[in-house]
Image (cartoon, grey):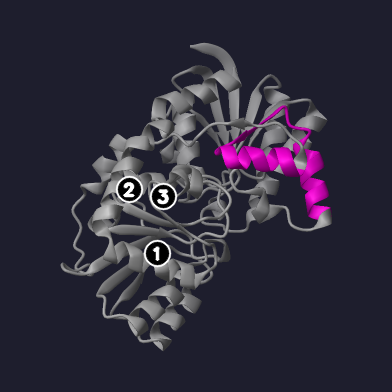
Amino acid sequence: MIKKNILLFAPELGGGGVEKNLFLIANYFSTKFQKVTVISASPEYKNKFKKKIEFITPISEFWIGIKNRRLKIIMSLFLLIRYYFKNPKFTLLSFKGNLYCCLICKILGIKVILRSNASITGWSKGFLRHFFYKNISKMADKIIVNSLEFKDEYKKKFKIKTHCIYNPLNKDEIIKNSKKKIVFSFFKRNTNNFISIGRLVDQKDQITILKSFKQLKEKTNYKFKLLIIGNGINKNFLNKFIKKNNLSLHIKIMNFQKNPFPYLKKSEVLILSSLFEGLPNVLLESLSLKKFVISSDCPTGPKEILDYGKNGLLFKANDENDLLKKIIYYIQNKKKCKFLLKSGVKRLWRFDYHSNLQKYVKLMN
């Protein structure tokens, strides 16, 4: 057991990839470090952490389900400052609200490591934003990114050296969760069954998927079903598009599922249409369940996971026509795609659970 106090900072928690990594890393740290603490303004997620971990959160039930991100960051920074005056010796690993956290840590003299979660392309547009993020990022003691392409972005755009640690993939847990029995009759035999999993927001760009399947229905006779799992501000907009274009028999949007793996298991192909990412967990989860992947070639992560198209199909981000071509290619060339899938499954060793978590421990120590 390493005699070190580790604090994990995550103001806002949900059901996304960042949170999945946080839960894995925090619980693993609790077996390696003497003391592990989590600060968050999302009290409803306390049961995701082992009992050994100290979970610091607002006492009031007001914070349960609150979605205002800035409010949660402000509260979490207050909790951080209060914690510092009681326990001044610790190393902090920040998962969200990174730049605000970094500023406070530098003022207080706290060693801080930032874990950057999504491509610079998505959060550093415009001169002022770019200048602000670049200079505050330089204040961090270390920065962790989750793909080599992401690492190159930091070097080229910010001239900052980072450490690349892939997302730890717990294949056994994914396979175990996929075996849960569900009543689900939407997917059909002798039909091409597709799935897309992610928040219904502009970044994930599900409208491009819908436009492609609209063309598939109009231009071909291929039978298909598409299940989209997720919640978000674009849900009504996407449902209106489905109804307007008479796609309701073919496309279904399902609310966010804590365990989407049984649905993923029943599908053939996962489609990711994001405009930017970091290292999308859903691609790793799909390959773990031996599902073929069609993904946008967005920054960063997909091309790295799919070995630049050797282990799946990549299409130009925000290009419905290119996605349509890839969908048709899959339908017409399932044997070839099965070979690509086998190659992708074999390459999952890069994201091994234990080896990547151990890299976090080594860096923190």
Gap between marks 2 and 1, in whole Å?
A: 14 Å
Part of the protein shown in magenta: 128-157
Callout 3–callout 2 Cβ contact below 8 Å? no
- Residue 77 visible in this rendered orientation of the protein: no
- Crowd around label 3: few <14 · some 14–19 · many ≥20 (10 Å): many
Quadrant position of the C terminus in the picture: top right
Secondary structure under the numbered disc 1 in the rendered image? helix
Where is residue 248 shown, x and y percent of the image? 33, 81
Q: Amino acid at mark 1?
A: Lys
Residue placed furthest toward the left? 189
Q: Nearer the viewer, residue 119 or 228?
A: 119
User: Tag 2: residue type?
Assistant: Leu
Q: Are marks 1 and 3 in contact (CB under 8 Å)?
A: no
Residue on which the image places disc 1: 326
Mark yes or no: residue 360 visible.
yes
Q: Secondary structure at mark 3?
A: helix
Queried whether the magenta region covers residue 36, the answer comes back as: no
Labelled disc at residue 282: 3
Q: Relative to residue 37, is residue 279 depicted above or below? A: below
Identified at 23% across, 57% down, the residue is 266
Residue placed under numbered mark 2 in the picture: 340
Circle 2 Cα neighbour tier, 10 Å, few/some/many (<14 / 14–19 / ≥20):
some
